Image (tube, rainbow, N blue to C red):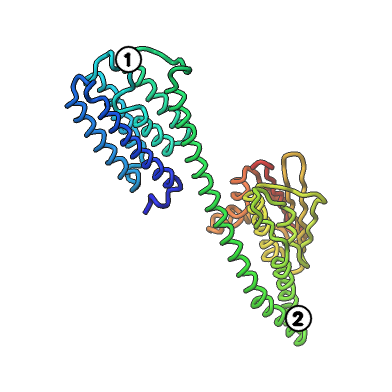
Amino acid sequence: MAAERDPSTPLWRAAQVFRLLSCGYALGFQVAITTDLDRPVLGWALFAVLLGWSTVLAVGYLRGFARRPSWVLAELVVVAALMLSTEVVASAAWIDDNQSWPTTLWATNAVISAAVLRGPVAGMAAGVAVTVINTVLKGQVDYNLGRNATLVVEVAVGLAVGLAAQTARRAHVELQQATRLAAAVEERERLSRHVHDGVMQVLALVARRGREIGGDTAELAALAAEQERALRRLVSSTDTDRRAGESLDLRMLLQRRASDRTVVSLPGTAVPLAASVATELDAAVGNVLDNVLLHAGPAARAYVLVEDVDDTVTVSVRDDGMGIAPGRLEEAVRQGRVGVAKSIVQRLATLGGQALLQTAPGEGTEWELSVPRRA
């Protein structure tokens, strides 16, 4: 049920226990004051409404369908109506000397409901509303806290219960995040074992057999050996994104990109970025390096340089390949191939940064990927 998944469900249950106790107190108060009322029969009829409405609310809050602002507002309206009906069933002199006949304790249920549903601000606002209704009933403003603590009690209840509900929801969100992180780490470890036991073993075998055969297969052997080393670095490197912190050291991500054809130059100190920014920037660098392998030529090498200056982090990726002919990227977009536009340029724009390209035929390419530190 949806109600069971609500992190504030224990508070709703406790609130209904309080509602039951407050109804019991209201019943005892009703019995005690019946002979003092001007219209005792009407008083008992209104008390029957109080019990019926309390039952409906208890069922609704426990099952979950009443956990809505409209229901809480309706509860506050009924509280106001029953409190003000004291003028109908009792004399002015009795009102001056007593609390409203539904009792202030029972009226506090509306404050608790508002606090559980919307937090401390809504709870305190409901507490002030109940106090104002009581003031209207009395016909005079008396906020002498030494003799009348209604305002303090109602506001304090709204604050305390609201903070408890807010804390419960935050704890629930953090627990869900921790659960997802643990599942992701477990899956990553499983894949790492699979890669180590399967893919890397096959690549190592292909590299060894290719070197033994020689000839044209030697190039395939070299490529297999390079990929096997890259995978081994990836599996054995420190997996910093498993940490629960909100930032990552960009260096730890980019150092995995180093290979026989890729030289990575990193600062001597950490380059902390928000985890989402660091992973997106690393992915953009990976896209650039993939293009180097595919299009720059079989002997092209790539050079990655990281610069951390002031509030901007810049990653330059340069290669010594054949470069890109003028208009080639625009032609690719017209043909529907938008890898560069989406995987690099748009990705950096989403981070609030920019991707600048410098290239010329025969002079290689250079990408300058910049993001603000607080992207």
- Badge 1 crowding class, 10 Å Cα cut-off, few under 14, some 14 to 19, many 20 or more, is few
> Where the C terminus falls, by quadrant?
top right
Mark before the other along the chain sequence, 1 or 2: 1
Instruction: Give whichever of 233, 337 is nearer the camera.
Output: 233
**Percent coordinates x, y for residue 261 in the rendering:** 77, 66
Say which quarter of the image contains residue 312.
top right
Say if residue 351 shows up in the picture.
Answer: yes
- In this rendered view, identify the residue nearer to me: 199 or 99: 99
Q: Which amino acid does label 2 sit on?
A: Ala
Drawn side of residue 133 relative to residue 349, left or right? left
Query: Is there a contact, CB below 8 Å, between mark 1 and mark 2?
Result: no
Provide the residue designation for mark 2. 218
Mark 1 vs mark 2, CA separation in Å: 102 Å
Name the residue located 77 percent from the left edge and 83 percent from the top edge. Answer: 211
| Mark sitting on residue 6 | none
Q: Which of 148 and 171 is in front in this view?
A: 148
Q: Position of residue 156 (x, y in %)?
A: 48, 29
| Amino acid type shown at disc 1 | Asp
Disc 1 element: helix
Residue 300 in sight:
no
Instruction: Name, please, the residue furthest toward the left.
Output: 41
The image position of residue 373, as x and y in percent, is 69, 42
Please provide percent x and percent y for residue 268: 82, 51
- Which image quarter holds the N terminus? bottom left
Residue 353 higher or lower than 302, as above or below: above
Quarter of the image where one finds residue 241: bottom right
Q: Which residue is drawn at 67% across and 80% down?
A: 202
Q: In this view, does 184 lie above or below 112?
A: below
- Label 2 residue SS: helix
* Residue that appears at 72% across and 45% down: 313
Residue that numbered label 1 is attached to: 96
Q: Residue furthest right?
A: 268
